Image: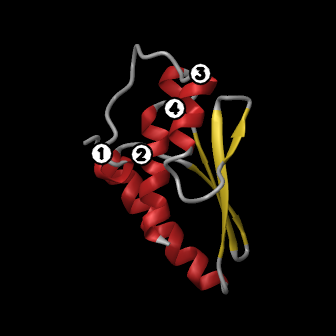
Amino acid sequence: MAKKLFDKKCVERIGVKSMVKEDIDKYLSQLKNQWEVIEEKKINYTFKFKTFKEAISFINKVADLAESENHHPNIHILYNKIKIVLSTHSVGGLSENDFILAAKIEKIV
């Protein structure tokens, strides 16, 4: 049985080609939330919280996770809304790492 995304670890992707639409769709189907695909190069999702303090607590957990995975998202703070944007710079688009981190972020909430 194949490992679930959140059971995998992000690894260096230098020399790997970015994902094509079919692969992106396959990986999106493994996520709980409806992540938006931007030009087949990024995925993003906005998490909403009751308070600013809860949102910042979430960011701190995401930061710890990103450090442990060595894969860092762009994070946008909009009071109680946190927009996470993922892409893999070394491949110029999306890689499995982006979906691994997205799945792990979803588990934090």
The residue that label 2 is drawn on is: 100
Q: How many numbered badges does the structure rendering display?
A: 4
Q: Which residue is mark 3?
A: 20
Residue type for callout 3: Val
Write down the residue under mark 1: 8
Q: Evaluate if marks 3 and 2 touch, with contact meaning CB atoms under 8 Å apart.
A: no
Say which element carries label 2. helix
Labels 1 & 2 near each other (Cβ < 8 A) = yes
x and y percentages locating residue 102 in the rendered image: 50, 51
Label 3 element class: loop
- Name the quarter where the N terminus is drawn: top left
- For marks 1 and 4, the one nearer the N-term is 1
Classify 10 Å Cα crowding around label 4: few (below 14), some (14-19), many (20 and above): many
Q: CA distance from mark 3 to mark 2?
A: 17 Å
Q: Nearer the viewer, residue 78 or 45?
A: 45
Q: CA distance from mark 3 to mark 4?
A: 13 Å
Characterize the local packing of mark 3: few (<14), some (14-19) or many (20 or more) Cα atoms within 10 angstroms.
few
Question: In 3D space, how far apart are the residues under numbered discs 4 and 2 (Cα atoms)?
Answer: 12 Å
- The mark that comes first in sequence, 3 or 4, is 3
User: Which of the marked residues, 3 or 2, is nearer the chain's N terminus?
Assistant: 3
Q: In percent of the image, x 59 and y 26: which residue is there?
A: 22
Disc 4 residue type (three-letter): Thr
Residue at the location (49% across, 40% down)?
98
Amino acid at the residue labelled 1: Lys
Determine contact: label 3, label 4, CB under 8 Å.
no
